[in-house]
Image: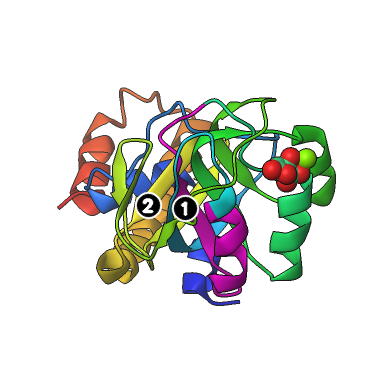
């Protein structure tokens, strides 16, 4: 493994809470298929809405294991689909996060490739703009840099600053351990209100 041991299996919500930062993308960025989980360091792609040449160029340039993080301006076009998925898997790219539309959802699910996008869209794209790679991009209202740790699941997506990842993962470990203890007490018959003081403790463990 690695990529911080695949983010130690933590959910996007846990990582968001543990970070104490504005790392959660807009809830309008959704998994393309149920059960998709995205995890890996970002490789950023600035494209142009309605044009997917940048994505074709990104695939051979992105390191294996990375997540393509592409700003397509939220445009409602099928910027990505089955063919690009096969090409990305051939290069061992871990997934795609895109502020824009994608298509071929059923085929992408069958291939097991995690895609998180703003919309599904049928319309095909131009191929004129070659793209800009590696700079900051804005996706789902959050600025993402190459190397940031991207984690996506059914709740949405977080992008964790590369310099802060270990601290956030350690706090997430502590938060999960504490919540397990709270749920044990609930199963033992305590009400969630009885545990209010423990919720205060949770906050102390997980925020700056
Ligand atoms: O070809 C495209 O431009 C997008 C697509 O549908 C695919 O990758 O299969
Ligand atoms: Mg297609």
Instruction: Answer few, some or many: residues within 10 Å of disc 2's Cα (few below 14, many 20 plus, some between 14 and 19).
Output: many
Residue farthest front in this picture: 128
Q: Is 85 colored magenta in this rendering?
A: no
Identify which residue, 90 or 51, lies in the foreground. Answer: 51
Picture quadrant of ligand 1: top right
Q: Which residue lies under the disc numbered 2?
A: 159
The reply, left or right, for residue 160 in relation to residue 122 is left
Boundaries of the magenta span:
54-75
SS type, badge 2: strand
The reply, left or right, for residue 171 in relation to residue 173 is left
* Label at residue 69: 1
Identify which residue, 119 or 194, lies in the foreground. Answer: 119
Dots 2, 1 in contact, CB < 8 A: yes
The reply, left or right, for residue 32 in relation to residue 146 is right
Query: Looking at the image, can residue 10 be seen?
Result: no
- Of marks 2 and 1, the one in the foreground: 1
Q: Is 59 colored magenta in this rendering?
A: yes
């Amino acid at each position: 493994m690695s990529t911080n041991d695949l983010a130690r299996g933590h959910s996007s919500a846990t990582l968001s809470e543990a970070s104490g930062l504005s790392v959660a993308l807009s809830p309008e960025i959704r998994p393309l298929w149920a059960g998709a989980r995205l995890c890996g360091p970002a490789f950023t792609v600035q494209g142009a809405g309605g044009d997917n040449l940048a994505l074709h160029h990104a695939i051979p340039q992105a390191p294996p294991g990375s997540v393509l993080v592409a700003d397509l301006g939220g445009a409602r076009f099928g910027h990505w689909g089955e063919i690009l998925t096969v090409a990305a898997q051939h290069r061992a790219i871990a997934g795609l996060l895109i502020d824009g539309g994608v298509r071929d959802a059923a085929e992408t699910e069958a291939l097991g490739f995690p895609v998180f996008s703003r919309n599904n869209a049928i319309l095909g794209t131009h191929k004129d703009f070659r793209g800009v790679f590696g700079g900051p991009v804005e996706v789902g209202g959050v600025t993402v840099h190459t190397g940031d740790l991207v984690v996506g699941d059914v709740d949405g997506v977080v992008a964790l600053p590369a310099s802060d990842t270990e601290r956030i993962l350690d706090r997430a470990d502590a938060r999960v351990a504490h919540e397990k203890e709270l749920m044990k007490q609930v199963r033992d018959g305590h009400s969630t209100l009885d545990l209010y003081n423990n919720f205060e403790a949770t906050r102390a463990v997980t925020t700056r």
